[in-house]
Amino acid sequence: MTIMNINGIIILAATLAAQSPVDQVPRTAYDGLAVDLKSRRPVYTERHEEVIADGKRVGLRSTYLSPDGVVWATRIVDFSKSQFVPDFEFEDRRTGYRVGAEGRGDSVRFFEREDRLAPLVSQTLRIPGTAVVDAGFNNYVQANWATIASGKKTYINFGAPFAMDYYGFRVYKDGERTEGGRRFMTVKLDIDNFVIRLFLDPIVLTYDMDARRLVSYEGISNILNDAGDSYFVRISYDPYGP
């Protein structure tokens, strides 16, 4: 397990069946532009379709595109079983890498495939306490908005399918600001281990306080560069994302 992998679990993705009920309801869409934190250059675009039923977000379909419009990766998320622990799958079209999770009662089945030629490996485990997987984190923040906005730290166990394990994280408010007539709140996510935390930068998320929607994400990406390393990016949504 590398430090990079531990920090990257927030943005790994999930799966749903092709004939899931989420195919039968309206969608809303938004884009995110990912800028490399080192070069300050745009490196890819995220295109998301939210699936809404009865006013609730029940699914998410994401496409990751290169600067010239080539599809690099896809992600499918299904919140129908759980808002915090969704079924999900992420696939890198360039290599065939797949990773995801599937809820099974009070347990979660994690699965991963290194590339197109590798076998699919899986493991089922129980995640104690407040369990969160992939895009369920944003739902967690919105569901616990009042507590986080008050400045109180909350604690979650974040499932990491690539590691077939979970890790404890802290979630907390890191400040507010007003800009262009809009109020923003910064939320940080970092690992709940003092020693490891010394070597890891936190994930930084900014929310529109009135809409309670994400406007930016800063941290490690689930998209790899040409050298096979994860990008470190700032992803901006206009006016906001999920």
Image (cartoon, grey):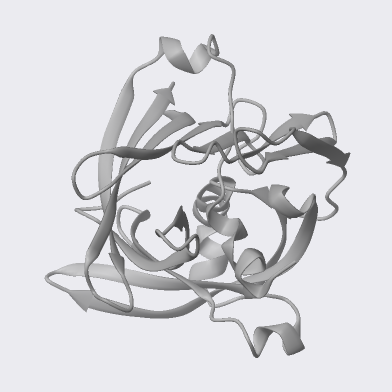
- Picture coordinates of residue 53, whole percent (x, y): 44, 21
- Picture coordinates of residue 189, whole percent (x, y): 57, 70
Horizontal side of 206 relative to 148 (left or right) equals left
Which residue corresponds to the image point at 29% horizontal and 53% vertical from the top-left?
44
Name which quarter of the figure residue 153 lies in.
bottom right
Which residue corresponds to the image point at 12% horizontal and 71% vertical from the top-left?
180
Horizontal side of 43 relative to 142 (left or right) equals left
Q: How many marks?
A: 0
Classify 29 as above or below 150: above
Horizontal side of 242 relative to 239 (left or right) equals right
- Picture coordinates of residue 5, whole percent (x, y): 64, 64
In the image, 90 versus 175, the foreground residue is: 90
In the image, 141 versus 15, the foreground residue is: 15
User: Which quarter of the image is occupied by the N terminus?
Assistant: bottom right
Classify 152 as above or below 226: below
Most extreme residue toward the left, as rendered?
180
In the image, 206 versus 219, the foreground residue is: 219
Classify 140 as above or below 51: below
